[in-house]
Amino acid sequence: MLEWVERELIDPSAITHPLFEHLHGQVMIAIDDFGTKLELGIAGAGAQTAEQRDYLTSHGIDFLQG
């Protein structure tokens, strides 16, 4: 499970934008590999409404945390 916690707003810049693009691609691959090849459950954090719950469960999220 990967959890990203921000303490301050990070403004897009010539440095941060390419970094986030790279991380986004790598994280998606890692989640896909873990979720399909290792048969691990996927947790969705921050689900606080019925709409969010329904969206996450309909997309295969196994565990929810509000």
Image: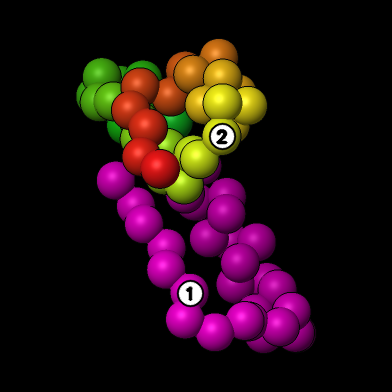
Report whether 37 appears left or right of 5. Answer: left
* Residue type highlighted by circle 2: Thr
Q: Give the crowd class for mark 1: few <14, some 14-19, many >=20 residues within 10 Å.
A: few
Q: Is residue 33 visible?
A: no
In the foreground, 43 or 36: 43
What SS does tag 1 mark?
loop
User: Would residue 8 be counted in the magenta stretch?
Assistant: yes
Residue 6's disc number:
1
* Residue type highlighted by circle 1: Glu
Residue at image location 54% in from the left, 84% down from the top:
8
User: Would residue 34 be counted in the magenta stretch?
Assistant: no
Residue at image location 56% in from the left, 20% down from the top:
54
Name which of mark 1 and mark 2 comes first in the sequence. 1
Q: Which residues are magenta?
A: 1-30
Please name the residue that numbered disc 2 is placed on: 49
Dot in front, 1 or 2: 2
In the foreground, 26 or 46: 46
Measured as percent of width and height from the top left, residue 3 is found at 36, 57
> Which residue reaches farthest front?
49
Label 1 and label 2: CA atoms lie apart by 22 Å
